Amino acid sequence: MSAPSERDWEQVVGLLAGAREVALACHVGPDGDALGSMLALGAGLRERGVDVVASWGGEPFEVPAAYSFLPAVDLLVKPADFPQAPELLVTLDTGSLERLGSLADRVDRAGCTVVVDHHANGVPYGDLRLVDDGAAATVVLVADLLDRLGVELTQETATPLYTGLVTDTGSFKYLATTPAVHELAGRLLATGIRHDLISRAIYDTAPFGWVQLLGRACSRARLEPGDVGGLGLVWTVVEPTDYDATGLGLAEVEGVIDVLRVTVEAEVALVLKSDPVEGGWKVSTRSKGAVDVGRVCTSLGGGGHRFAAGFTAAGSAPDVVARVREALAHAPHLQP
């Protein structure tokens, strides 16, 4: 595992402490950790009087319904309105340039680019890097950064921090949940945030159309017990007709894989989601701990964590599944 040195922290803190304008960016199709880390840092910098804008380089540009409660969303601007050559650019939860989408070109144009992340895979980029692949979530690094900047925790910063923490630890059930994670959660709860309402919004609130779409996707699920070296693969597809039938969009179907991954006969779960805007597929993977799907997805042009990762792909669904199956066949098994 790698972690930032004290010199790394000092450089980034010094840069942000003297900044007047900061542009923040996270990965396309942002999840709770991407949005949470970006908005928490943005809110904290704004408290210091910094002019902040935040965005991600993908369409449609809208906050997923599950995260619509987050504060500081007024910092968000559409990709077209994001600074073309920011003086200081900070990317969050984004392990590779490709994951920045249409904002990737800002890295070369920026006066300085700081990368704050907990993904160690992908080709390193940026001028300064706070990257710790041992951290449970990027919000863990952001919380440390805000502490070092002297920003007091408030509900406005604690809410997005808790959102990133709870989503990337799977409600504190994943392996990355450590005593330090619970200590941070305790600090965030002490600000008075309603953790019950946060979790309800993320995990327990969905339109009826989502239930219908889940049924359609699960009805297509296939179990391949001989794949992944005999550890098993379960996969399904979300078709364009599913969006038409239920009135949902791509942003609302991420939770399908969390249902699929409970399959006891399969180590790896795979969901292909049709992209109604750009075409092709958004592919999500999950591992129960024996396979590094982050490395698998990196080899296929994407990235992510060891146990949760994704990539984009073109071609027919069977062809994409075959490519994933081949990559999984060569993936090393991890020690429990």
Image (cartoon, rainbow, N blue to C red):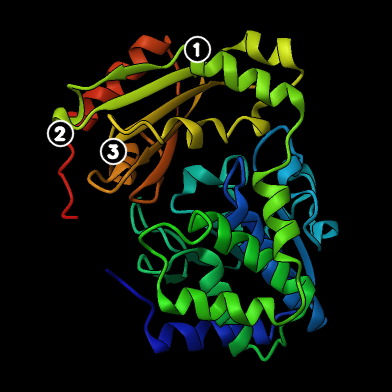
At 77% from the left and 58% from the top, the residue drawn is 70
Q: Which residue is mark 2?
A: 330
- Residue 304, position in %: x, y? 41, 47
Which badge, 1 or 3, is on the more N-terminal residue? Answer: 1
Q: Which residue is mark 3?
A: 296
User: Where is residue 232 drawn, in percent x and y?
Assistant: 24, 28
Which quadrant, please, contains the N terminus? bottom left
Left or right of 218 in this view: 231: left
Question: Is 65 located above or below residue 313 in the figure?
Answer: below
Tag in front: 2 or 1:
1
Q: Which residue is mark 1?
A: 219
* SS at circle 3: helix
Badge 3 amino acid: Val
What amino acid is found at the position of numbered circle 2 in the picture? His
Q: Taking 182 as reference, is 120 left or right?
A: left
* Residue at screen point 62% across, 11% down: 240
Closer-to-camera residue (75/292): 292
- Distance in Å between CA atoms under marks 2 and 1: 29 Å
Q: Position of residue 191 (x, y in %)?
A: 74, 80
Image position of 173 with respect to 182: above or below: above
Answer whether labels 2 and 1 touch (C-beta < 8 Å): no
